[in-house]
Amino acid sequence: MNGGRTAVELARSSLSGVVRHLRKEKEREEIDRIVCGYCQYEGIPFLRWQTFRNGKRHLRAECPECGRYIRWQRQTPANLAEVYRQQEEGRRSES
Ligand SMILES: [Zn+2]
């Protein structure tokens, strides 16, 4: 009896771990990934803001490995959250 209950609890707790993991994966997938044509890097780009002469801000995606410009990134919530996260990270490492 006791052993059975423990097994159920174990299964339940590992399932919630899997769900948490999947949710994390989904969030990560929403960030637009790049493939670098120079160094073959694949994954999340280095993002930074660039302001055009007309005042519009664009998200510039660069290869985190070789630093080359890849493309302009769509301003989706996930991409915006990622550029914010990277800026926060940069600020922390500077100080
Ligand atoms: Zn590269």
Image: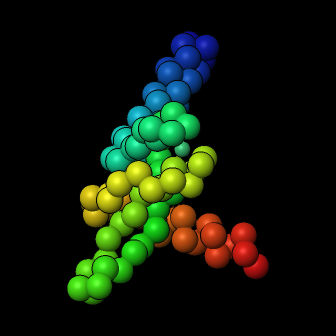
Q: Where is residue 9 in the image (x, y as percent from the top left)?
A: 53, 26
Q: Residue extending furthest right?
A: 95
Question: How is this picture coloured?
Answer: rainbow
Q: In which quarter of the image is residue 71?
A: bottom left
Q: 39 above or below 77?
A: above
* Quarter of the figure with the N terminus: top right
Left or right placement of residue 37 versus residue 76 in this view: right
Position in image of residue 57 (x %, y %): 31, 77
* Residue 78 appears anywhere in the view: no
In the image, 81 versus 33, the foreground residue is: 33
Q: Can you say whether 87 is above or below 47 in the image?
A: below
Image coordinates for residue 58, horizontal then vertical, percent? 32, 71
Residue at 51% over, 65% down: 85
Q: Which of 20 and 64 is in front in this view?
A: 64
Residue 77 in the image, given as x and y percentages of width and height: 30, 62
Report the front residue among 85 and 48. Answer: 48
Residue 50 appears in the figure: yes
Q: In this view, does 72 lie to the left or right of 22?
A: left
Q: How many marks?
A: 0
Q: In this view, does 95 lie to the left or right of 40?
A: right
What residue is drawn where x is 29% and y is 85%? 53
Quarter of the rendered image showing ligand 1: top right
